Image: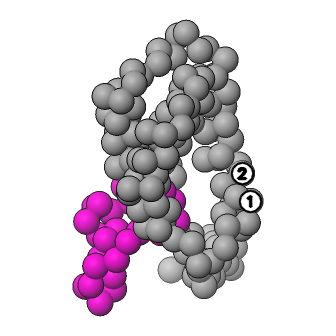
């Protein structure tokens, strides 16, 4: 497992930090998707994915492609000065919720956003708990594998029978 969730919010010095990378995306999706769903449920009504099957299928497919193949291409295009905290505070703060109240969002768009976000969140959960994947940790850098041992040299001396 990728460590406890509390470790993601602690720096090496013990001070608090906002997680970045896949961890930051996981935390922001885990917090913002339920908030968005509850907000949409009380403001309008959550659309049923069965009524908008194409939007649900496209949302799941786009979420899968983002989480598995195209995340690095998307992240490379985002400027360095933009952080997860800024985006979440902008969209979930007063401006984002005010825009959601003023602009009518079509039901297929809501289904697409919720299914894509849910798919990404589900794939990150699977990666976090998978014993075969390093989890949501950033890749290790500067670590070299141990040198290979020459097994053939020792096997000849043991086979001679001079013990």
| Residue 43 lies within the magenta run | no
Q: In this view, does 53 lie above or below 39?
A: above
Q: In this view, does 115 lie to the left or right of 66?
A: left
Identify the residue position indicated by label 2 in the image: 70
How packed is label 1: few (under 14 Cα within 10 Å), some, or many (20 or more)?
Answer: few
Residue 114: percent from left, percent from top = 50, 33
Q: Quarter of the image for the N terminus: give it.
A: bottom left
Residue 63: percent from left, percent from top = 61, 39
Residue 123: percent from left, percent from top = 51, 41
> Is residue 77 among the parts visible in the rendering?
yes
Q: How far apart are marks 1 and 2 (CA)?
A: 5 Å
Q: Residue at x 62, y 77 (%)?
A: 80
Q: Do the residues labelled 1 and 2 touch (CB within 8 Å)?
A: yes
Q: Which residue is drawn at 61% across and 47% down?
A: 67
Looking at the magenta stretch, what is its main secondary structure?
loop
Q: Is residue 101 above or below residue 18?
A: above
Q: What stretch is highlighted in magenta?
A: 1-26
Residue 22: percent from left, percent from top = 51, 59
Q: Residue at x 38, y 56 (%)?
A: 94
Q: Is residue 118 left or right of residue 160?
A: left
Identify the residue position indicated by label 1 in the image: 73
Residue 78 or residue 6, whichever sits in front: 78
Q: In this view, does 31 lie to the left or right of 73?
A: left
Q: How many marks?
A: 2
Colour scheme shown: one colour
| Residue 4 lies within the magenta run | yes
Q: Residue at x 49, y 46 (%)?
A: 99
> Is residue 137 among the parts visible in the rendering?
no
């Amino acid at each position: 497992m990728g460590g406890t969730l509390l470790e993601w919010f602690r720096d090496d010095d013990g001070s608090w930090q906002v997680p970045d990378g896949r961890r930051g995306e996981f935390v922001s999706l885990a917090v913002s998707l339920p908030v968005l769903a509850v907000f949409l449920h009380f403001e309008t009504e959550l659309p049923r994915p069965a009524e908008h099957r194409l939007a649900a299928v496209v949302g799941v497919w786009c979420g899968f492609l983002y989480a598995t193949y195209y995340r690095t291409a998307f992240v490379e295009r985002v400027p360095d000065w933009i952080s997860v905290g800024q985006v979440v505070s902008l969209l979930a703060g007063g401006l984002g919720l005010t825009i959601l109240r003023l602009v009518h969002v079509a039901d297929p768009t809501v289904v697409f956003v919720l299914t894509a976000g849910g798919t990404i969140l589900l794939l990150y959960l699977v990666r976090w708990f998978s014993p075969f994947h390093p989890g949501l940790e950033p890749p290790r850098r500067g670590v070299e594998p141990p040198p290979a041992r020459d097994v053939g040299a020792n096997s000849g001396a043991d086979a001679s029978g001079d013990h």
